[in-house]
């Protein structure tokens, strides 16, 4: 393998004098000390706090407020205690005490010589963080999928309430937010952290310790969310519209602590990804030679960084409404429900693109490999990403057409929302153009591309319906919306992500994915998905509102079909998961470049060494130099000659 | 082949987990035992002679030794603030095409109803109810303790059904009697049921806590809301 | 980075000496794969277009349309489906043909490089961008005009922030409360009802509010939908033009009994409406 790289003799860099000895708490901290720290601090906070709350001296309302403050403090203490326990603050504290991290410490933190233990520690190596994100995403998908099965069971049993209505309302909310978090991290987490630095020829992320921080913050954010079901649930859908959220029991605080923490996590990850992509590309990787997946990650990171604080802020204000009796969203105290809705959807809509854009980038990347064709119109792909990032800032009101907060806002926001279909169309063009006349290598990752384009088209077209105010006047709040965003997030997002993970599986685990069983699972899930959500479109068109557990007999048939479909999706996903786990453990060992791809990530060895590349590569062209000259050009030339002869004869 | 078998096994385990969880969660949230209206004879109504059924309910401000309330299992944890509840059950069963008379003994204090509409009597025979023996169509919104409001299930095939009766509050300074509760206010009202169907009832008076006092007890099944089955 | 290309190629080579556009178009259309894709495209369109009728059929299953607004909504859905059909068909036909027609490679080893190295194609880009932009522009313009139309149907001939000038219009104060709808007729003796009874062909004007959390007032077959917000009154209107009983649902999660927050609207004749008013103790003011 001849890299077109120039090797420079690297002069020894003089190291500054180091203060302090290596070792200390950093070497002992791991997830278990984190758990001890988190649970310990939470228990102490609860014990001390419950002494401070004047129980029994006030009326029931005050007790509720006091209880809210206590639970909020306890859940926050869990997060802080966990981060202390896992050693997140050990480095900064050493600096404050005048000690450096020694070189040995830095290498220890990167996971050098620790075997599997490094996955349970505050490890800074981007590859370890990528794997941690992957596992986390799988756990969240399992949890969210389990909730989905319960929801569909309730909706399939049309003749009675299976669950308590409150429990059902909590289920849909928890399913929603768990899946949203899982979808946000499933591509930008594992692939953005593991693959992206390899792809741009970097030794690590720009801020390795922030990288670890972003993952462990996410890890700490999940238990409060899961705890909500034990604390009375969130009962409010994943949007937790206020003031209904204020009425819910203390489970709502689990949601709020989770979102506030998760927003820190995404913000930190976003800064890290952006800085890495902008500053750490290999020599020669000019902006027009950057692989398209990297651009997709950059676009998603920018959107997340800008818009996530809105969501975080909405939850901080909502928590303060509960805890200290403010009235940001309580009309009786001068607050506004529309303020919450605006803050929420300022993130709420760009977040969809945060999910879909990296998936699109990943699939564009792997299409070139499986079709042995260059990416069709790289510039259109860039323009598509840029257009989506830009316009996504000004479309949020289309979630609020029917709130009545500004009837005239329907006109401009209908315009902006439908305009976003044009840059999205660029991406479809790039995909279709790359497929055009290509010989397909029919492996599972490539099949995911077909699945994704189909779902994206269905989701996109129904999205155009919903962006239109008159149509939305019928569809808003109905099952049609549910089916639409599942086509976008699950159809385009998750099936695409499955393809991307299969594609990079050999690089990440060193083993080939079992595509035989994986395909069975993938296609079962895909066709069952069509069944489930196509039938849900019908329920929506008939006028079935969303988030209900009992409904008119008229919707029975479509709900039965949806439920059967959902069970089949569950079976398919389990088969896929089985294939993934067994290939991870006993799969065929992978060579360093099993797909014959040209991006840098496949040019280093598998498993990837600690600092990725023995010698940093120098890039001399873009990574899409596949294919042979177009045979039809010859035909055209002949035609041209014929033309000239004909003209000459005349 | 072995791998295919294991694949099937994975799916079966997954299905088992889901089925088991559904069963567990259903069981834990079982509704209280159904309270059936007793048929006591026939009655002359505007719709001719119909079977006459009666049902006795009570509303207690909190549980006590003599009235345990829905205070069992997981409910014991959330009831530590002393929630009011309907007793002996919130799952009611009424006969179809009959005159149903419900008598409510009410032991709880007042909280002003948000919507004066629910201080009025709706859907009963003659649009009236008897409050401590006096026939009225409405009571003072400030003196409402709870309401008993049956309303529609989202089912267009079954007859529309709406009954709402406010429950008079006991005075704040009323003395407790031997059973630990003050002297009850007694409400009695009758309505005519139609064809069989499933319905929902709940209290519309803000007697909970949290935002607009509709949280807590108002938002939990088994205290201030339940089901009505017409069979 | 590039393993086997000796000369770095960032931009496609532009072929020189190309024939006349018309000839190229003819040549392009004569390629077998182009013809087959066009054939699949036509077939798919024939399959997809009837979905437009199906979609409207589903929307009418529960008895609508019962107002001119709903008629407009259905028309919009119908037109959008028809307009989207070619987009969906062209995408699907390229996907289908690529699996069947341009050849497939299977196996473990990376295939030989046999696909044409098409870096871009100016004509295709321009054509696609103009087609999708035209489509989007059409949909935007259609949507804006429809929005203006249904707004005028909802509010009579007056703008949203004024009372309707149609003297015959009936005001209805709609109040959402966990988990019931109540209706008040302020000009008909302030009578109240749990069921919305209205006369046919009379403009209705709704003042919608909520006592507690956010609800959404949805009259399914009349195409009326507006949030009921606490602390604010939102307005909308409609003129029912079909006798019958239709569904009112809550379309915004509002807590425990959200699924049961339903009632009905009865569209009756003016005479029936008057006698209903008398029965309720209200008076006819119009």
Image: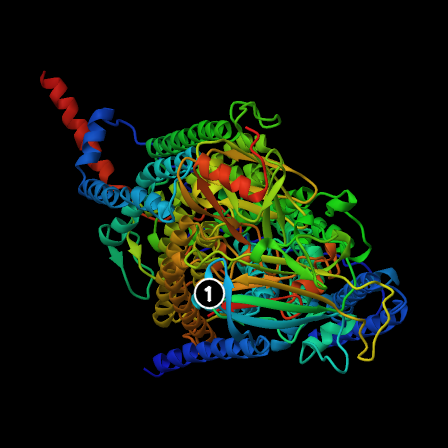
Furthest-left residue in view? A649
Q: Residue A59 lies in what quarter of the image? A: bottom right
Q: Is residue A209 visible?
A: no
Left or right side of A418 for A132: right
Left or right side of A27 for B40: left
Q: Residue at x 87, y 69 (%)?
A: A55
10 Å crowding of disc 1: few (<14), some (14-19), many (20+): few
Secondary structure under tag 1 reads strand
Front residue of B72 and A304: B72
**Image vertical order of residue C207 relative to residue A610, above or below:** above
- Rendered image coloring scheme: rainbow
Q: Chain of mark 1?
A: B
Q: Residue B80 lies in what quarter of the image? A: bottom right
Left or right side of A61 for A627: left
Q: Which residue is mark 1?
A: B49
Location of residue B26 in the rendering, given as x and y in whole percent from the top left corner: 54, 76
Furthest-front residue in view? B44
């Amino acid at each position: 393998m001849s890299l077109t790289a120039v090797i420079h003799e690297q002069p020894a860099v003089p190291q500054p004098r180091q203060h302090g000895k290596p070792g200390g708490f950093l070497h002992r901290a791991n997830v278990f000390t984190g758990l001890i720290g988190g649970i310990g601090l939470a228990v102490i906070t609860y014990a001390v706090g419950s002494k401070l709350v004047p129980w029994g001296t006030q009326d029931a309302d005050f007790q509720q407020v006091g209880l809210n403050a206590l639970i909020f403090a306890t859940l926050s203490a869990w997060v802080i205690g966990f981060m202390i326990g896992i050693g997140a603050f050990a480095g900064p504290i050493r600096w404050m005490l005048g000690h450096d991290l020694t070189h040995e410490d830095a290498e220890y933190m990167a996971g050098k010589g620790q075997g599997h233990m490094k996955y349970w520690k505050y490890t800074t190596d981007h590859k370890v963080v990528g794997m941690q994100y992957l596992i986390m995403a799988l756990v969240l998908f399992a949890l969210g999928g389990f909730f989905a099965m319960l929801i569909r069971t309730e909706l399939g049993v049309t003749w009675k309430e299976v669950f308590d209505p409150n429990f059902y309302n909590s289920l849909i909310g928890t399913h929603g937010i768990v899946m949203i978090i899982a979808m946000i991290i499933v591509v930008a987490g594992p692939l953005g952290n593991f693959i992206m630095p390899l792809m741009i020829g970097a030794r690590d992320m720009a801020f390795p310790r922030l990288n670890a921080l972003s993952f462990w913050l996410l890890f700490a954010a999940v238990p409060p969310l899961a705890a909500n079901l034990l604390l009375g649930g969130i009962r409010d859908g994943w949007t937790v519209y206020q003031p209904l959220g204020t009425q819910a029991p203390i489970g709502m605080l689990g949601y709020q602590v989770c979102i506030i923490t998760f927003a820190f996590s995404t913000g930190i990850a976003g800064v890290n990804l952006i800085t890495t992509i902008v500053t750490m590309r290999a020599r020669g990787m000019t902006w027009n030679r950057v692989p398209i997946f990297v651009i997709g990650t950059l676009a998603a990171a920018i959107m997340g960084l800008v818009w996530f604080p809105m969501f975080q802020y909405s939850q901080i204000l909502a928590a303060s409404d509960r805890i200290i009796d403010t009235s940001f969203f309580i009309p009786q105290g001068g607050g506004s429900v529309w303020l919450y809705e605006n803050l929420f959807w300022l993130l709420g809509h760009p977040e969809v693109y945060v999910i879909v854009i990296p998936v699109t980038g990943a699939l564009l990347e792997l299409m070139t490999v499986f079709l042995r064709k260059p990416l069709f119109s790289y510039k259109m792909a860039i323009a598509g990403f840029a257009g989506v990032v830009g316009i996504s800032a000004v479309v949020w009101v289309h979630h609020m057409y029917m709130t009545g907060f500004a009837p005239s806002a329907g006109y401009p926001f209908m315009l902006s929302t439908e305009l976003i279909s044009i840059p999205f169309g660029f991406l479809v063009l790039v995909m279709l153009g790359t497929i055009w006349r290509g010989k397909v290598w029919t492996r599972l990752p490539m099949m995911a591309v077909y699945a994704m384009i189909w779902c994206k088209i269905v989701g996109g077209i129904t999205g155009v319906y919903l962006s239109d105010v008159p149509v939305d006047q019928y569809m808003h709040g109905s099952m049609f919306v549910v089916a639409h965003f599942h086509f976008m997030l699950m159809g385009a997002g998750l099936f695409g992500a499955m393809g991307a993970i299969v594609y990079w599986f050999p690089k990440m685990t060193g083993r080939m994915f079992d595509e035989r069983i994986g395909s069975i699972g993938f296609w079962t899930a895909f066709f069952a998905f069509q069944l489930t959500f196509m039938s849900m479109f019908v329920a929506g068109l008939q006028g079935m509102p969303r988030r209900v557990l009992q409904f008119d007999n008229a919707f029975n048939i479509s709900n039965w079909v949806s439920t059967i479909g959902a069970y089949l999706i569950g079976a398919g996903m389990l088969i896929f998961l089985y294939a993934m786990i067994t290939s991870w453990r006993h799969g065929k060992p992978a060579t360093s470049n099993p797909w014959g791809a040209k991006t840098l990530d496949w040019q280093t060895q598998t498993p990837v060494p600690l600092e990725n590349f023995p010698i940093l590569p120098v890039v001399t062209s873009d990574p899409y130099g596949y294919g042979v000259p177009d045979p039809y050009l010859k035909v055209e030339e002949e035609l041209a000659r014929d033309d000239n002869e004909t003209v000459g004869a005349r | 082949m072995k791998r295919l078998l294991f694949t099937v096994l994975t799916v079966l385990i997954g299905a088992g987990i889901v089925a088991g969880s559904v069963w567990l969660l259903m069981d834990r949230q079982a509704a209280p035992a159904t309270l059936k209206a007793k048929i006591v004879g026939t009655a002359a109504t505007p719709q001719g002679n119909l079977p006459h059924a009666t049902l006795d309910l009570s509303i207690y401000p909190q549980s006590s030794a003599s009235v345990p309330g829905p205070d069992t299992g997981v409910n014991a944890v959330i009831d530590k603030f002393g929630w009011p509840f309907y007793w002996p059950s919130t799952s009611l069963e009424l006969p179809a095409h009959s005159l149903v008379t419900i008598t409510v003994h009410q032991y709880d204090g007042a909280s002003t109803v948000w919507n004066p509409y629910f201080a009025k009597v709706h859907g009963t025979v003659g649009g009236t109810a008897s409050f401590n023996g006096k026939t009225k169509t409405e009571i003072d919104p400030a003196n409402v303790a709870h309401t008993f409001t049956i309303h529609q299930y989202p089912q267009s095939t079954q007859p529309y059904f709406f009954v709402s009766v406010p429950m008079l509050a006991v005075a704040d300074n009323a003395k407790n009697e031997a059973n630990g509760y003050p002297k009850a206010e007694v409400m009695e009202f009758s309505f005519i049921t139609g064809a069989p169907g499933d319905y929902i009832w709940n209290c519309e008076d803000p007697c909970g806590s949290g935002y607009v006092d509709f949280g807590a007890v108002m938002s939990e099944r088994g205290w201030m809301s339940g089901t009505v089955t017409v069979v | 980075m590039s393993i086997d290309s000796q000369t770095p190629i960032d931009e496609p080579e532009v072929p020189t000496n190309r024939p006349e556009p018309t000839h190229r178009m003819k040549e392009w259309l004569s390629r077998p794969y182009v013809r087959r894709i066009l054939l699949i495209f036509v077939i798919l369109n024939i399959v997809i277009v009837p979905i437009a009728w199906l979609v409207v059929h589903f929307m009418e299953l529960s008895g609508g349309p019962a107002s001119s607004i709903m008629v407009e909504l259905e028309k919009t859905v119908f037109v959008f489906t028809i307009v989207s059909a070619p987009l969906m068909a062209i995408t699907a036909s390229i996907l289908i043909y690529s699996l069947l027609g341009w050849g497939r490679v299977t196996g473990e080893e990376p295939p030989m490089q046999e696909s044409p190295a098409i870096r871009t194609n100016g004509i295709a880009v321009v054509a696609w961008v103009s087609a999708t932009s035209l489509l989007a522009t059409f949909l935007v313009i259609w949507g804006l005009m429809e929005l203006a139309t249904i707004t005028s149907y909802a509010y009579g001939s007056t703008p949203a922030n004024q009372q309707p000038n149609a003297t015959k219009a009936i005001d209805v104060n709609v109040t959402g409360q966990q988990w019931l709808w109540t209706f008040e007729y302020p000009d008909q003796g302030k009578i109240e009802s749990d069921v919305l009874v209205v006369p046919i062909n009379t403009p209705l004007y709704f003042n919608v509010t909520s006592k507690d959390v956010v609800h959404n007032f949805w009259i399914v077959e009349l195409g009326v939908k507006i949030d009921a917000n606490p602390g604010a009154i939102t307005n909308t209107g409609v003129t029912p033009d079909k006798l019958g009983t239709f569904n009112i649902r809550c379309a915004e999660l509002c807590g425990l009994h959200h699924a049961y927050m339903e009632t009905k609207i009865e569209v009756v004749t003016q005479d029936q409406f008057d006698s209903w008013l008398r029965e309720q103790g209200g008076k006819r003011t119009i």
